[in-house]
Image (cartoon, grey):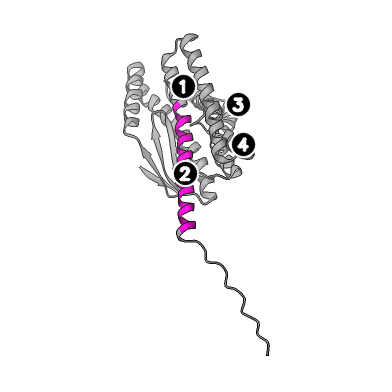
Amino acid sequence: MFRIRGIQLALHASFLLLLAYVGWEGWRDGGWEGAAWSVAIIGAFFTCVVLHELGHCFTAMHFGIGVRRILLMPIGGMAEFDSIPREPPRELLMTLAGPAVNFAIAALLWVIVRSPGRWAFSSYEANAVGFAHTLLHWNLLMGTFNLVPVFPMDGGRIFRALLATRLPYLRATFWAATVGKVLAVIAALVAIFWFHAYLTAVLFAFIFFAGETEYRAVKRREIEDAHWREVMVRFYATPPPEPPPLLTTP
């Protein structure tokens, strides 16, 4: 699409299908005005998603980490980085920046919601306050949901960063992924047997496998780093320092 401070913003092909579906549902309920309103709502929501990801990206760039792109999909957004910092304070700040943006947006929208007066966009059942109220709840939900301590949510990385202050990075990832997988299994069982929400259970299954994927990826990087360190030591070892010149007596 375009770039924001050098960060490419890209749309997955399935995102266009989402816009078409939302527009169609809006048209069925309220004609062209309903279609425009529905697309505007989903557009505003994903604008908040982009701002969330930019929070991650700008913090990463502050630490000198390259950002490849932000990819928008029907299920949300994903920022692609050249690397993830292994220093717990940096990973913690970089991860917290996303939900912090959502809570900041929610605070701004709360001011709008609490202000007197309504500014109707049209005769349709929408007004500026109602629009802001909807976005306020979405941002609170987005920020809070991302703090759940499971991968691939921000909460999983925050939990890992906190553990990494006491444990090796790989071990911290293992425990963060394990806790996330246990929570995902419990939530999936509750969704199936208590609420009969099978699609929600599929979401928790995705979270389960995301935790395993994160651990395997970190483990693979650890093995590769160890291999290349061994190669560097074996073939490119730093030569010993030059011995001091021999002392001679006159």
Answer with the quarter of the image where residue 103 lies.
top right
- Which of the two discs, 2 and 3, sits closer to the camera? 2
Does residue 40 sit above or below 197 in this rendering?
A: below
Mark 4, other Cα within 10 Å: few <14 / some 14–19 / many ≥20: some
Q: For residue 211: magenta?
A: yes
Q: Name the residue tied to disc 3.
A: 114
Q: CA distance from mark 3 to mark 1?
A: 36 Å
Amino acid of disc 3: Arg
As drawn, 250 above or below 110: below
| Amino acid on which the number 1 mark rests in the picture | Phe
Give the foreground label among 4 and 2: 2
The residue that mark 2 highlights is 223
- The answer to which image quadrant residue 122 occupies is top left
Residue that appears at 48% across and 52% down: 230
* Label 3, label 4: how far apart the Cα atoms are: 37 Å
Location of mark 1 (residue): 204
Q: Where is residue 174 shown, x and y percent of the image?
A: 53, 33
Tag shown at residue 162: 4
Whichever of labels 2 and 1 marks the residue nearer the N terminus, that label is 1
Q: Residue at x 61, y 79 (%)?
A: 245
Determine whether the residue tagged by mark 1 lies in a helix, strand or loop: helix
Residue sitting at 31 percent across and 33 percent down? 13
Q: Which residues are magenta?
A: 209-234
Label 2, label 3: how far apart the Cα atoms are: 54 Å
61 w.r.t. 154: above or below: below
Q: Can I make out residue 100 in this image?
A: no
Labels 1 and 4: the sequence-earlier one: 4
> Which of the two discs, 2 and 3, labels the residue nearer the N terminus?
3
Picture quarter with the N terminus: top left
Disc 2: CA contacts within 10 A as few (<14), some (14-19) or many (>=20): few
Q: Earlier in the sequence, mark 3 or mark 1?
A: 3
Front residue of 32/103: it is 103
